[in-house]
Amino acid sequence: MLSPTDTKESIRDFFLIRQTRLSFMLRYSRRKFSQSAFHRFRVEIKKLKAVLAVLEEESVEFSRKKTYAPIKKLYAQAGRVRELQIEKELILSQIQANQLPEFCRRMNTEIQQERDSFFEIRTWKARKKAEQSLGKIAKEIEKLKKINWLPTIQTSRKRIKALIQESIGPENAHELRIQLKLSKNALEMQGFPALQQADPQEEELMKLLGDWHDLEVLAQRMSPSPWAGTLPAPEKKILEKVIQTLSLQKSRLLSEIQSKAPSLLT
């Protein structure tokens, strides 16, 4: 069992990795901020959220909402870029790009617009505020004599159990994924190799939930398609068939999630 001192050191080490990586990425040039960089940026912030959750439990003076606010704006806009990137990938996984030239042109334009919006938000002042927030987190960790990470894990596990007992559906599937990620990241903070790998059943469920969520976001944006009335008729027909295929995949994934989620309760 980790002592309070060991726990604090492992959380500090985990946070310093996030701080270093995010500080570098906040300074990336437009060219260096590739599609994979947007993904890594959001992954690091998701791990940072686990640190924030622990600090919120441990310190009555710590304001999670206020500290996270400057980072949240960048995270949200990076999410808009990622959603469109994934949307394009999903559709082109079913069809050749040359069969939807106008659709691809519009998607590329929209992705570029959201990228531009991200860099408009990521001003020097915004970067500075985000880095100051990271500095506040570092100070909060140092200020605490001991850090108990167990309440965060326990709260997350209780919520996971409650969600599964409610029965997983479109209205709570994404929250289950968030809680599973939080639980995994909180365990990773402890620095044990054995704890850095979630249970294989949980890993599989997180993957299914992630795939389902990507398709759910696409379905919401494409019902109806924002370009349904303006795409060339042949492309519109092809796109409708692709969306139908992906919708069936989404339904199958949800069924698989519903059948496998209860295994986490045993």
Image (tube, rainbow, N blue to C red):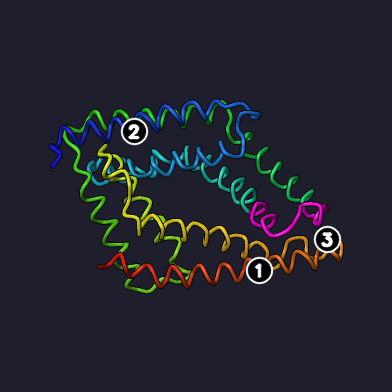
Residue at screen point 80% across, 56% down: 100
Q: Residue at 57% of width from left, 44% of height from top?
A: 77
Asked whether 175 falls inside the magenta stretch, the response is no
Disc 1 versus disc 2: nearer the observer: 1
* Region of the chain picked out in magenta, as a range: 87-103
Give the camera-side residue of 128 and 264: 264
Measure the alpha-carbon separation of dots 1 and 2. Answer: 42 Å
Q: Residue 101 colored magenta?
A: yes
Q: Secondary structure at mark 2?
A: helix
Report the amino acid beneath label 2: Phe
Q: Along the polypeptide, which appears first: circle 2 or circle 3? A: 2
Secondary element at tag 3: loop
Check whether the beta carbons of the residues at disc 2 and disc 3 lie within 8 A of each other. Answer: no
Judged left or right of residue 174, residue 245 is right
Measured as percent of width and height from the top left, residue 232 is found at 86, 61
Residue at 62% in and 60% down: 218
Q: Amino acid at mark 1?
A: Thr
- Percent position (x, y) of residue 123? 58, 29
Q: Quadrant of the N terminus?
A: top left
Q: Quadrant of residue 145?
A: top left
Q: Which mark is residue 231?
A: 3
Q: Does label 1 or label 3 sit earlier along the sequence?
A: 3
Q: Which mark is residue 15?
A: 2
Q: Position of residue 90 (x, y in %)?
A: 64, 56
